[in-house]
Image (spheres, helix red, strand yellow):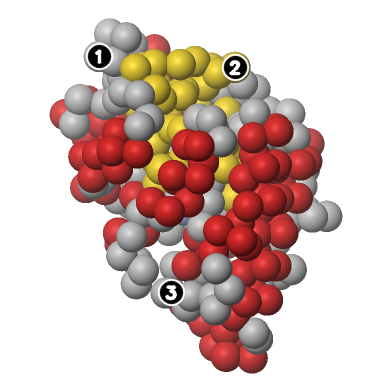
């Protein structure tokens, strides 16, 4: 069965997105998305301003579950979290929550929010190759933790277009091996088209490597606004198909479901 899947979407509850959950769903229906997932930034006792609070988890989860029932004849709604992989800040309330899937994302190297324009100055003080190596080391540790289903925006470190001197495949190879071994899925995330890099996550070069290693994919528009729902899906789909992908993964109760692209 062919399905259009979009599992990475935010809501107003993270304090840096606009639009009600209802509006996101209506837009997803309009865009003919079959399986639409919310993956709000999970609570964490760090960078607390731009994410849910622990006490809001139940409100978020119930709201999505109610709307899932309300719209069940029009669209298949899924519930997830985008979880920051930051050692010492992982919390079982999130990791063991009753959701369909968890996206594991690295937005911090140590405690440096490297994708936040506020802290862009730090790039100047560090060796760019080391930054890339450290970032992918964090992603590998996230994968090896075994606590997540989807690798969020695999090569987010390219966001500001500060590229390494070392070859990127040589930096990412071990991470991809870990992903394969863990049975995790990579998301094709179109948010990169809205950033200085102006490119999909992951790059075509890395997605080809993933394909050759038989790593499965899913899709995410990483919407923080209503009009970003389904953003640039056609380009993402074309890239995946050109490479050879013919199936897409969704999750229900932390189990994989496979659909045709
Ligand atoms: Zn966000
Ligand atoms: Zn993210």
Residue found 34% across the figure and 17% down from its top:
260
Find disc 1 in the rendering and name its residue: 74
Q: Earlier in the sequence, mark 3 or mark 2?
A: 3
Residue found 46% across the figure and 24% down from its top:
249
Q: Is residue 69 above or below residue 115?
A: above
Find disc 2 in the rendering and name its residue: 255
In the picture, measured across the screen, residue 45 lies left or right of residue 247, that is right
Q: Position of residue 37 (x, y in %)?
A: 42, 30
Q: CA distance from mark 1 to mark 2?
A: 22 Å
Quadrant showing the N terminus: top left
Does mark 3's beta carbon lie closer than 8 Å to ligand 2?
Answer: no
Q: Residues within 10 Å of mark 2 (few under 14, many from 20)?
A: few
Q: Residues within 10 Å of mark 3 (few under 14, many from 20)?
A: some
Name the quadrant containing residue 29: top left
Name the quadrant containing residue 126: bottom right
Give SS at disc 3. Answer: loop
Hey, which residue is sitting farthest left in the picture? 30
Find disc 3 in the rendering and name its residue: 160
- Foreground of the two, 19 or 100: 100
Give SS at disc 1. Answer: loop
Q: CA distance from mark 3 to mark 2?
A: 34 Å
Q: Is residue 17 above or below residue 36?
A: below
Residue found 46% across the figure and 23% down from its top:
250
């Amino acid at each position: 069965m062919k399905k259009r899947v979009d599992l990475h979407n935010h809501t107003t509850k993270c304090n840096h997105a606009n639009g009600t959950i209802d509006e996101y769903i209506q837009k997803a229906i309009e865009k003919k998305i079959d399986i639409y997932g919310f993956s709000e930034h999970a609570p964490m006792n760090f960078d607390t301003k731009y994410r849910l609070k622990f006490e809001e988890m139940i409100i978020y989860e119930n709201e999505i579950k109610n709307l899932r029932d309300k719209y069940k004849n029009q669209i298949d709604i899924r519930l997830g979290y985008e979880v920051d992989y930051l050692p010492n800040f992982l919390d079982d309330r999130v990791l063991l929550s009753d959701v369909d899937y968890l996206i594991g994302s690295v937005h911090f190297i140590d405690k440096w929010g490297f994708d936040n324009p506020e802290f862009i100055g730090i790039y100047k003080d560090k060796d760019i190759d080391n930054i890339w190596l450290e970032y992918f080391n964090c992603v590998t540790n996230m994968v090896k933790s075994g606590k997540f289903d989807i690798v969020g925006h695999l090569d987010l470190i390219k966001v500001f277009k500060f590229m390494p001197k070392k070859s990127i495949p040589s930096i990412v190879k071990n991470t991809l091996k870990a992903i394969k071994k863990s049975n995790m899925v990579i998301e094709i995330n179109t948010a990169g088209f809205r950033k200085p890099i102006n490119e999909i996550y992951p790059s075509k070069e890395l997605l080809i490597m993933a394909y050759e290693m038989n790593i499965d994919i899913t899709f995410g528009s990483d919407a923080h606004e209503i009009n970003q729902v389904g953003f640039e899906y056609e380009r993402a789909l074309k890239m995946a198909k050109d490479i050879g992908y013919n199936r897409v993964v969704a999750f229900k109760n932390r189990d994989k479901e496979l659909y045709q692209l």
